[in-house]
Image (cartoon, rainbow, N blue to C red):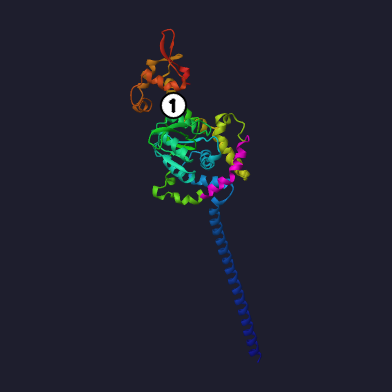
Amino acid sequence: MLNYSSNIKSRSLLKSNNKENQQTDQIEIKAKSCNTLDDSIKDAIKTATRKNRSKQKINETDISKVVRFVSKQISASIELSSENKLAISSLYFVMTWFTDVLLYVPYLLIFSDVPGAGKSTFIEVAENLVYNPKTLSSFTRASLSIDASNSEGTFLLDESDNAPLSQRDMMAILNSGNNRRAGGSLRAAKDEHGNYTKLIKTHAFGPKIIAGLNKDYPNTLIDRCLAVKIEVAKSHQYLDVYQRPAPKSYSKFHVFMKKFAEANKGKLLEILHKDICPSHEVFKNRSSDKFKPLFALIELSEDEKFKRIWRNRVIKYATSGEYKDKYQSLSDRFAETVENLLKEAKIQGEYVTTKELCDLLNAQPAEFKKEFANGFDFTGRKISCLLKPLDIRPTKFPPSNHRGYRVEDFS
C-alpha cells in the first residue's frame, strides 16, 4: 500500500509539474508573440511615418521645407562644387514664384569650362521647379520682349554661348529686363486694316536662367547675374534621359507653390522694405539688389537653424572666391595668360614692344591661337582689341618711341 500511494503521489507531482511547465511555455510563447507583435507594430508605424514625412516635404507651410525639397531635387542630378552654390540655386528657384511682387530680379548664370558638365540637365531640372518656365535655345530680342509682355514667367536660356548676347539690341533688353521700372521697347503693330499704325510697348522683365559654356559674356550682363559654375557630373549622379522624372510628377508641387506664394507675398514685401542685407562691402549698390530677394526668402522661415545656416551660405558665396572669381571674360583670361608668359620669358624692363608680344604669342600652341585669335596669328590690332575692355592700351615709350605695353598693366 505504501508503495502504491507513493507512486500515486509521484504521478500527481509529475502531472502538476508538467502543467506548470506547459503554462510557463505558453507564457513564454505569448511573450515572444507579443514582442514580435510589438516589433511589427513598430515597423509598421515607422514605415507609415516615413511615408507621411515624404508626403509632407511639399505640404509643409514653412519655406525651409520647400527650399530643402528643391535643394534635394537639384543635387540628385547635378554636381555643384559647394553647398553655397547649391543654396543660391535653390533659393533662386523658389524666388521665381514671387516675381510679381519683386521690383528687381537677378539673373542666374550657369556655366562650365567643358561640355557635358550638366548645364542642359540643370535647365531640365529648373523646368520642373520654377514658375511658368519658358525654355529657349535660340532667341532674339523680339521673342524675349514679346513673350515676357504676354505672360510673366521664368526664361530658361540654354546654349547661351551660341546666342547673340553681345548685340546691342539684345544687351539693351537683358540690361533692362531685371528691373520692373526700367524702360521697355516700342514695336510697330498692325491695325485692323493691316497697316503698321500702332505702337506696342513690350518689356522683358522677369527672372532668367542663362546656361552655356564659359565664354566672353558682356560685362553688363555679368553684373546682373548670380554665377554658378558646374563641375563635371559624377557617374553615379548621371541619370538617363528616360529615367529622369517627368514634369507631371511635379504637378502637386506647382499647385502647392502657387498657394504658398499667394499666402506669403504680403509678408515678403514687408521684409523687402527692411534693411536685411549684412553690412559688408559686397552687399552694396547693385549687389544689394541681387541678394536681397534671397535674404528675404530666408527671413520668411520660422526655423532659426535654417535661417542661420542658409544665411551664412549666401554670405560665404558672396564674400568668397566663388563669387568674385566666378567668371573670367575672354579679355581677363588673355591678360592673365600674357602676364604668365612674360614672367616665363623673363622680359626685362618696364615695357614690352608690340612686336615682341606678337612673336611671343604666335609661338604658342595652336589651341592658344584658337581660344584667343580664332586660330589666326596675333597682330597688334588683335591684341589691342582683346585688351581694350580692360583699359589696357598701347603707348609709345622712350627712348626709341616704339609702341608697346607696360608690363605692370598685366598684373
- How many C-alpha atoms fall within 10 Å of the one at disc 1: few (<14), some, or many (≥20)? some
Position in image of residue 338 (x %, y %) = 42, 22
Q: Residue at 62% of width from left, 31% of height from top?
A: 279
Is residue 371 shown in magenta? no
Q: Residue at 41% of width from left, 9% of height from top?
A: 401
Position above or below: 355 against 93 = above
Q: Secondary structure at mark 1?
A: helix
The quarter of the picture where residue 91 lies is top right
State the residue position of label 1: 333
- Tell me the quarter of the image containing the N terminus: bottom right
- Residue at the far front: name it: 193
Work out whether residue 117 or residue 61 is closer to the camera in this orientation and state it.
61
In the picture, measured across the screen, residue 309 lies left or right of residue 160, that is right
In the picture, measured across the screen, residue 22 lies left or right of residue 403, that is right
Work out whether residue 176 or residue 326 is closer to the camera in this orientation and state it.
176
Is residue 273 shown in magenta? yes
* Magenta-drawn segment: 255-275
Position in image of residue 140 (x %, y %) = 40, 34
Amino acid type shown at disc 1: Arg
Position in image of residue 344 (x %, y %) = 42, 21
Asked if one can make out residue 252 in the rendered structure from this viewpoint, the answer is: yes
Asked if one can make out residue 230 in the rendered structure from this viewpoint, the answer is: no
The quarter of the picture where residue 365 lies is top left
Position in image of residue 405 (x %, y %) = 43, 16
- Residue at the far bottom: name it: 1
Q: Main secondary structure of the magenta part?
A: helix
